[in-house]
């Protein structure tokens, strides 16, 4: 066999956008429909943030942070339609969605050392699997050559209402005004940071989900990808 024959070229669907723009639910369902892996890079940044907070590290470079990143083991486990995030084998799926992690994650994800470590993990996963990968810098930095790129946007109030619905389902009772502020602040931090800020890739297709149902946005993306794959584009 020629060496080239052994190289697998996987298909990457990159989905970027601001907080609560519907990326996670959309990416998960698009991945199921295409039978691709769902790679939630936000969950990876949240997992590192959780471990740093547990180790009482501040969001700044330090020898302890370097050591923590060297030892870091993040895995995803899929059971049926659900995906769990594991850190060192521990299931942290619920903990990484806590208010404290959500408040701190933008500060930790601005650190270049953390970004480089996760970038490496994300590219390894993308080299081995067909993936629907969602985050902030997927189309610009992680997979700039991704075959498919989408950028999801939605009005701030609509995003806040969706996040409120999610949190209420999880038994929390925050105010809509507090969520609007939290999203505005996180968008500001994510889009103004120096390293890999939230930005639309030039060749990404914008999808405004303000007036769309989840089914509609999933169908738009999956149908686009399926058509191109069938045509062999
Ligand atoms: O998608 P999310 O809300 O779970 O992401 C949590 C945070 O992680 C987000 O505020 C910024 C950071 N993040 C990032 O910097 N780069 C990514 N590719 C994904 C997330």
Image (cartoon, rainbow, N blue to C red):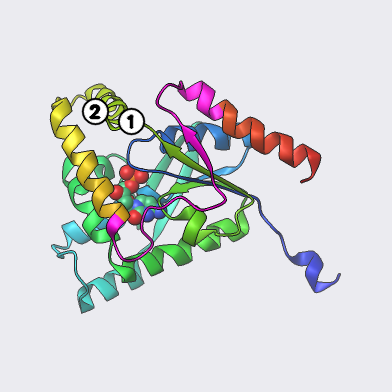
Farthest residue to the bottom: give it: 63
In the rendered image, residue 213 lying in the magenta stretch gets the answer yes
Q: Nearer the viewer, residue 207 or 16?
A: 207
Taking 223 as reference, is 213 left or right? left
User: Residue shown at 51%/28% (left/top)?
Assistant: 217
Taking 137 as reference, is 105 left or right? left
The image quadrant that residue 111 belongs to is bottom left
Q: Nearer the viewer, residue 88 or 185?
A: 185
The image quadrant that residue 157 belongs to is top left
Residue 141 locus on image (x, y percent): 48, 61
Farthest residue to the right: give it: 1
User: Residue shown at 35%/43% (left/top)?
Assistant: 18
Span highlighted in magenta in the image = 192-218
The residue at which mark 2 appears reads as: 167
On screen, residue 179 above or below 140 = above
The image quadrant that residue 193 belongs to is bottom left
């Amino acid at each position: 066999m020629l060496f080239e024959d052994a190289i697998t070229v996987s298909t990457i669907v990159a989905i970027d956008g601001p907080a609560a723009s519907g990326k996670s639910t959309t990416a998960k369902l698009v991945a199921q429909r295409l039978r691709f892996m769902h790679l939630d890079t936000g969950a990876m940044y949240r997992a590192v943030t959780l471990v740093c907070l547990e180790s009482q590290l501040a969001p700044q470079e330090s020898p302890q942070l370097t050591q923590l990143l060297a030892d870091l083991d993040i895995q995803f486990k899929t059971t049926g339609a659900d995906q769990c995030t594991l850190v060192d084998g521990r299931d942290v799926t619920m903990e990484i969605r806590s208010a404290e992690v959500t408040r701190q994650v933008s500060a930790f994800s601005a650190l270049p050392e953390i970004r480089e470590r996760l970038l490496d993990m994300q590219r390894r996963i993308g080299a081995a699997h067909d993936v629907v990968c969602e985050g902030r810098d997927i189309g610009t930095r992680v997979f700039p050559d991704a075959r498919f790129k989408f950028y999801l946007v939605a009005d701030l109030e609509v995003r806040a209402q969706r996040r409120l619905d999610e949190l209420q389902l999880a038994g929390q009772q925050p105010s809509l005004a507090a969520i609007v502020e939290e999203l505005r602040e996180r968008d500001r931090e994510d889009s103004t940071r120096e390293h890999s800020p939230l930005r639309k890739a030039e060749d990404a297709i914008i999808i405004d989900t303000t007036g769309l149902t989840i089914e509609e946005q999933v169908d738009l993306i999956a149908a686009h990808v399926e058509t191109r794959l069938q045509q062999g584009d």
